[in-house]
Image (tube, rainbow, N blue to C red):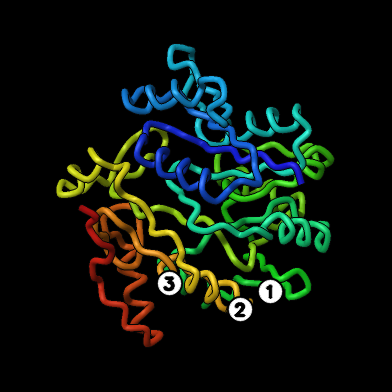
Amino acid sequence: MRTLTCVISYNRPGYLHNLLRSIREFCSWSDVLVLDDGSDHPQLVRDLDELARPHSGFAVIRKDRHAAGYHGGLYTLMNEALDYAGARNYELLHFVQDDMQIVWNDPKILESVRAIFNAHEDALQVQNVFHKKIAKYALIDNERFELHPESNSYHIRPYAITDTGFLNLERVHRAGFRYSETERGTSNKWRTQGFKLYGLHSPTVGFVPWPTVFQNGKQFGSWPWARPILKRSERYYLKPLSPGDVARLTSRPLEDIPFLDDYSVPVGWKCLYPFWFARPSLEYIKLIADSWKHGDRVIPRFVGRIDG
């Protein structure tokens, strides 16, 4: 299946550097588009200039920072990617964001995605992202997982975030689907149009547990002790899966939920377990309480290792 991987980027050069490195290593089956939302970080501007050169192996679209309303946000960019991929007759549009990394190569990934679309007419998108343990009991206690052994996949009821994974562009065109401006608006569309977001048995992409987060164009959650790491952020990354990790992941039963924490660790700085983006929060505290209630005895601790 002819596939375009679209990378959504904004002002995080370390993120983008490591994501593109992982794409080069693990995604030989896809063309790549970098869609940047008007970044002005000097290093990232230089990196985008390099990527935009002929024969770089990447296509690049950059929003004009000087245009009115240039910072369109995630879902506006995703609609632009839909138009770009549709105009070039791609069959699949694979979304990843710059705070992700691909951690292993699945040579059968497109075969698995095709099998899910063939088996389920209500599948518009197939997600290939590891879950984070911070959401473990919200998923399990509420019985939100629905397993589909016939396609070796699952979906999360009633809906899951739809900003990553493989979109079936023929179904997108047939349904006239467009992303709304907000996550809530998009989720309402999925509900009313009867779509389900399916998940691959063996995901390939992990969110990076980073000390800062961007939301609505604003940065927050920076820990003072993490700032030196941000200056050399290209050296901070998720550890790729070893052959043993891949064997564990691919041979586990479908009902065994794939959590990133069980397969990879961050290299370059230490972060609180289980992985999360920023400072501890009420959600994090609830996770700890739930884990003790279930007998997991998760103790807040630092994981990862410093590399040089």
Residue at image location 17% in from the left, 43% down from the top: 228
Determine whether 135 is above or below 99 in the image. below
Picture quadrant where residue 158 is located: bottom right
Residue at image location 69% in from the left, 36% down from the top: 178
| Residue position for label 2 | 255
Q: CA distance from mark 3 to mark 2?
A: 15 Å
Q: Secondary structure at mark 3?
A: helix
**Are circles 2 and 1 on residues that touch, CB within 8 Å?**
yes
Q: Nearer the viewer, mark 3 or mark 2?
A: 3
**Are circles 3 and 2 on residues that touch, CB within 8 Å?**
no
Q: Disc 2 or 1, which lies upstream in sequence?
A: 1
Q: Is residue 22 left or right of residue 89?
A: left
Picture quadrant where residue 16 is located: top left
Q: Secondary structure at mark 1?
A: strand
Q: Nearer the viewer, mark 1 or mark 3?
A: 3
Q: Disc 3 or 2, which lies upstream in sequence?
A: 2
